[in-house]
Image: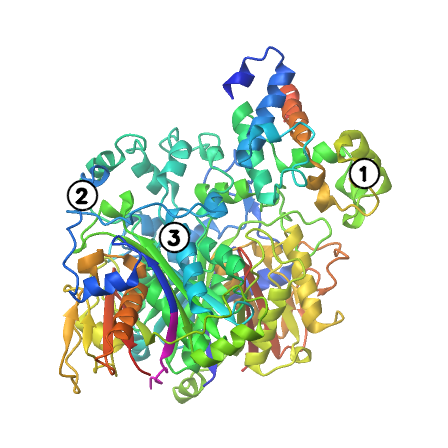
Amino acid sequence: MTAPVAPVAIVGAALRTARGDDPDALARMLVGELPPPAPFALPAPWSAYPVRAVAEIPGAPARSPHERILRRMGLHAHQVATEALRRSGVACGDRLGLYTGIGGLRAQWQDLIPALRDQSADFSASWSRGLRLLHPYWMLQHLSNNTHALLSKDVSARGEGFTFGGANAGAQALQAAAAAVVTGAIDAALVVAYDSLLEPELLLHWRGQGIPSEAAAALVLVADPAAAATAAVADPAAAASPAARPAAQAWLQARTAADAAETSDGDAQALPTAETVAAACAGWERWSHLDTAPWIAAPPPGPARTPHRATHDVTAILGDCGAATSIVQAILWATQLSRAASTPDASALCLSAGLPGLLGAVRVSSSR
Amino acid sequence: MTAVITGLGVISPFGAGVTAFFDGLCSGRSAVAPITSFDAASFPVSVAAEVPAATAERWRAPGAVSDAHARDRKVGFALAAAHQALAQAGLVDAGPGPSTAPSTAPSPAHGLEPRAGGHAALAAAALSLGLGLETALLEDFAVLGDHIDWDTERARALAAHAAGERTPRLRTPADLAARALRAHFGLGGPQYLHMSACAAGAAALACAASLIERGRARTVLCGGTDSMINPLGLGGMARLGATSPRAASDACRPFDLHRDGLAMGEGAAMFVVEDAAAARDRGATALAAITGWGSTQDAYKATAPRPDGAAAVAAMQRALQRAGLVPGDLDYLNAHGTGTPLNDVAEAQAIAAVFGPPRLPVSSIKGAIGHAMAAAGALELAACVLALAQQRAPGTTGLRELDPLCAVVALPPGAHPLRLRRVLSNSFGFGGHNASVILEAA
Amino acid sequence: MSAALTSSSPAVHHAETVRLAVAEALNLDPATVGPDSNLMDDLGADSLAFLDIVFRIEQAFSIEITRGEMERAARGDMSAEEFAPAGVISERGLERLRELLPEGGAKIAPGLRATQILSLFTVATFVKIAEGKLTGGAQA
């Protein structure tokens, strides 16, 4: 029934995480080649929440004219996407697609407080009691596709594209982008996801087993790196450096899955079940590295095990990056597999879970 | 593999069901009226196309994840529209629907039992849903905001307040809205949440067609749902200046010379999309086929469409190309047609660039039901399905004097009997996020 | 803004408040913003920036400036139909513009469209709108 989707090549990537923005160092950390970093702390503003630590991206995003609309994570996303595209050497224009994944709305209390402070209990006359103090840009700052819109303009991505939402939005975006590339609807896809779980309204109810974190991550996908290089030369408007020839760092497949929910209110905090994981990983039983948080039900053992299976957990070094996790995993494993020349046929199966019952699954391999 | 629509359900400002919806669109009457769901008297915008109070109350979300979700209109709209669609497709029993009794205290007993009469196909069905990003109920924000002193001790105050809380309020509510659908109908396939603003509803159908064509799903429940007719949504849009300043039933006048902005709307349209062969095998009736779709980005400006409509042109051309059609094959175009000065003229130019001298009948239903935001594209595609079925196109309610800069054959208000075999619907979201979808008579 | 507030004349005070609001909205050195600066041509404002400018002026004076009032700054009580039939400003409309928005200068010429009115706005235009609201605010 399910047609296999051919892998696509990762030809550029960039990210911002709580442990920095160097994929090589992060990949070494992940596989234990670098000593484990110091544990995350619980700085004062967050100490009243039911969490034991938080993992924040160090440093603010670079200054940008988009500050009037994009907030911190949107700016990080804009910047990693721009970097990933530049590194890829892929052409912009009508054949470049853009796929964005966002975890969810964050309330941005600093904007809302003036509008809420003097409301009455029944919210009568709510406009004159405060909503009139909402800035005209408030709606734009809250718009789900604001990063997508500004990014498409700045990198001239005029091909197909969508913005996805939810706890596994990064995996949704990867899958849609790969499908568009494989079917030839576009030559290349820029995929970016961002999420921050470090928000008051989320941490209030934190029952996650990891450390709440945040990340912005972007990568560029093409079906055929050689063809992408030709396209770059053919489009004189390309912002990317024509000298850079896209090289496949690794190959990627992405899927999403979700639990068959029994009830809508009883298990909203449920992680995806083993059945959901198995459904997403069907046909992917062969892998040499597994990247999954320990609280995700592990995939069923496959028939064709490779001899050197190893398990890693990206959340152990970065914290829970929410909807951005699948893309972070893809970048780190593409980096690791292209670095580890001794295992030419290596592959990593990367799982990330989101509440309620949502799964992102990515398979990264060193060869097609 | 071809994607066909075998079920359709609508909750609109004309009430529940496809008949009320399409008859309303064809009547030339506008559902835009003074807002009744909250006190909007002091707002700069005081009219909108609301789902009638009785309809909205009847279809409140049953068994919702949280109190906020029981009150979130768009969740109830989606459940009710999905029930209609699945019943028409023969995938659930055609009962009274997900909710029959209004209640302020949601409980699992509220409404029908989940999965009542559900078909086995639903266990593997995917969900592709366009929706506004989140619940933005003022009281949810305010109850927390009351306890925040942002400048000093935000975290401690919030956490202290949270001690008595038992349900999540604002944790990715879009996922929870989808969860309500998944749980109620027993959907077990992957889910896609489309957040491409005003293009989200059309994107959800395009995604569903793509899943079917690529063999990734056999059955997809898809569509769009949204409501921004609440103090924060309306206040934010009014501040942005996109809404018409006139408190009149013709606040939205697509393609009219004197158009001056949009009117807010709300609602949901849901579809069952299946592989044509599979639908035939189980004896389901195809209402229409989704044969083409295209999406592009303007890459121009955040707040204005590309004046020459070049990317909108490309979206329509991509849809035609996927469908294997040429422009002359189309019989009707349902425009995005928001009634804002910039959108309509840019869209008209794009239509002219694709279809040549004005020939193709065009209309916008936003004059009648306002702009339902993330649900707009789905409601417009619902209108297209019904137009194909009834061989009549809805006119452009609110249009009196065509703007000479909009060189399109804009159908005036009312019903227009036409021979319809292939139709296209445009949806253009914020920042130039374009989607075009082509439907053909099954 | 405090330096401006010490000024004795209300008119000077209003003009200074508007000038500073414009500078803040556009992230410009106030020294580069003069009363006659054209917002789009001289100061680089786009349509989005106009929203921010209006918001800041509203907050500074505790007034609300509606879209209708912005339009009336250009056409007075003339109907939209008379002012700009078919979207293009009529001869009478142009005359009205020269009266009400003389700062538009040579830009007020045949072929000007109603949608281009904002391109005529200077800092002084907003001073006029704000003062109109402050003196006649009761009936607004």
Question: Which chain is home to disc 1?
Answer: C
Residue marked by disc 3: A76
Residue C26 numbered tag = none
Which of the two residues, B246 or C29, is positioned nearer the viewer here? C29
Mark 2: amino acid: Leu
Q: Residue furthest top?
A: C8
Is the residue marked by circle 1 packed among few (<14), some (14-19), or many (20+) residues within 10 Å? few
Three-letter amino acid code at the position of disc 1: Ala
Callout 2: chain: A
- Residue A42 marker: 2
Q: Position of residue A278 (x, y in %)?
A: 21, 77
Asked if labels 2 and 3 share a chain, the reply is yes
Look at the picture and state if C64 lies above or below B163: above
Which region of the structure is painted magenta? A1-11
Residue A53: % across, % down: 17, 47
Looking at the rendered structure, which numbered label has been put on residue C106?
Answer: 1
Quote the CA–CA distance across marks 2 and 1.
Answer: 62 Å
